[in-house]
Image: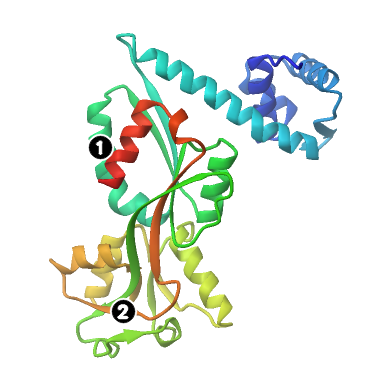
Amino acid sequence: MIHFDLADLRLFINIAETPSMTQGARKSFMSTAAASNRIKKLEEQMGLRLLYRDSQGVELTTAGETMLKHARIMLRQVQYLENELSEFSEQHVGHIRIFANTTAVTDFLPEILAVLMVQHPQLTIDLQERVNLEVLRGVAEGASDIGITAGPIKAQGLEVIHFRTDRLVVATHQAHPLAAHAALTLEDTLAYPHICLQEASSLLRFLKNQVDALQRELNVRIQVFGFESMCRMIEAGVGIGIMPQSAALRYQQTMGLNIIELHEPWAVRERSIVVRDAQALPEYVKTLIQLLIQ
């Protein structure tokens, strides 16, 4: 049976993520020589080569890729244990890593996380916006404790909890030429300038993939940081926008927006929570899940 030193696992993760023996050693607060020696002993113990080393840095072998995935999971489970036990102390702390799509990050998660953090004053949260595939990979590999996705997903080996259904719609100025339509296809909108989110947003990347499938180009006039800014630009007649219906309806209450059905099979978006093992999660993560599905 192989016995792992947690310090070696942390070192290996730091080296793999850098990817550099020197930088990984620095993150682990040890010399490069000491780090190299520990990794060599880890490889000897396992009888496998985990890293290729050259003057440019390090590269994971196939065995190293597998090791990285499981090392992250093992250390995360140790952290879960520490967090669970800390609930019995007066200095209870905790940390949640969340990978989520654009709508979750910009629309409904901030309010829910605020409630959670009031209930757990020592809790810290790392919230990152990712596309569905990155969310699933992050949860599977232990880089994220919980993932939030929108649309159809293939989450083999993960637990999926459906909690809400939304759909993408087209929002226009009330006097826009498209405003009289009851429904539009994506292709119908491509002759007009679009207001979009920033390049890194998962929604924009998703829409660009759909446009690429049509062998067309998306006419992006301006990119903004959130749905409120999108709606203000649309209200001003700068362009049209594709966004979740829930966001469009919210801002329609105070802005002059027209909302049109987007007639595409992918427009209906089931929102799901994705975790590795719900029963193994700390109580504060379970509380977050309950807040999401309420």
Callout count: 2
Indicate whether 237 appears above or below 120.
below
Seen at 58% across and 24% down, the residue is 75
Seen at 36% across and 85% down, the residue is 184
Seen at 30% across and 45% down, the residue is 292
Residue designated by label 1? 114
**Which image quadrant is residue 35 in?**
top right
Where is residue 52 shown, x and y percent of the image?
Answer: 84, 35
Badge 1 density bin: few <14, some 14–19, many ≥20, Cα 10 Å: few
**Which image quadrant is residue 169 in?**
bottom left
Residue type at mark 1 is Ala
The image's colour scheme reads rainbow
Indicate whether 24 appears above or below 61.
above
Pick the front one: 272 or 124: 272
Residue designated by label 2? 261
Indicate whether 133 appears above or below 120.
below
Looking at the image, can residue 230 be seen? yes
Q: Secondary structure at mark 2?
A: strand
Q: Is 165 positioned to the left or the right of 206 in the image? A: left
Where is residue 64 shown, x and y percent of the image?
Answer: 76, 34
**Which image quadrant is residue 116 in?**
top left
Pick the front one: 278 or 100: 278
Residue type at mark 2 is Glu
Where is residue 279 shown, x and y percent of the image?
Answer: 44, 31
Q: Is 154 positioned to the left or the right of 235 in the image? A: right
Pick the front one: 85 or 110: 85
Q: In which quadrant of the rendered image does the N terminus lie?
A: top right
Closer mark to the observer between disc 1 and disc 2:
2
Looking at the image, can residue 57 be seen? no
Q: Secondary structure at mark 1?
A: helix
